Amino acid sequence: WAPLTNVMAEYRESHHGLKVWVYPVAKRDHQAMRAVVEEQVLPDLTRWCREALAAPEGWRLMRHERRWSVSGESVTAKEREGVGALRW
């Protein structure tokens, strides 16, 4: 989640955005990874997006990141926000 700012904009609309990156995996791991992503990551991503869209303005004005890491069948999620979310 990143607030998109346009200093030239004379109107106040939704100036925020959501980006999702999916990194490639080895072909031999694709089927297992897909199952884990569909069962665990996508439902969590959906929930996180809904909460982001409904969040108060103060939250939406800050940068937020949530990263899911998959190892075998184990999924780990980490969140960062504000200035700390600029780089992993």
Image (spheres, rainbow, N blue to C red):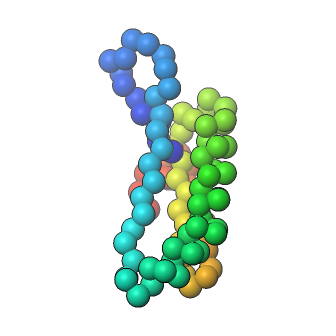
29 lies left or right of 74? left
Residue 29 or 8: which is nearer the viewer?
29
Relative to residue 64, is residue 53 depicted above or below?
above
Residue 52 position within the rendered picture, expressed as x and y whole percent measured from the top left: 61, 42
Residue drawn at the location 39% of the way across and 68% of the way down: 23
Residue 74 position within the rendered picture, expressed as x and y whole percent measured from the top left: 62, 80
Residue drawn at the location 49% of the way across and 80% of the way down: 31
Residue drawn at the location 58% of the way across and 74% of the way down: 36
Rendering quarter of residue 37: bottom right
54 lies left or right of 18? right
Rendering quarter of residue 76: bottom right
Relative to residue 85, is residue 16 depicted above or below?
above
Disc tally is: 0
Residue 32 position within the rendered picture, expressed as x and y whole percent measured from the top left: 53, 82
Residue 80 or 38: which is nearer the viewer?
38
Q: Return the residue found at the far bottom.
A: 28
Q: Is residue 21 visible?
A: yes
Residue 35 or 2: which is nearer the viewer?
35
Q: Is residue 79 visible?
A: no
Q: Return the residue found at the far top.
A: 10
Residue 39 or 67: which is nearer the viewer?
39
Residue drawn at the location 51% of the way across and 77% of the way down: 33
Q: Quadrant of the C terminus?
A: bottom left
Rendering quarter of residue 24: bottom left
Relative to residue 71, is residue 67 depicted above or below?
above
Residue 3 position within the rendered picture, expressed as x and y whole percent measured from the top left: 47, 36
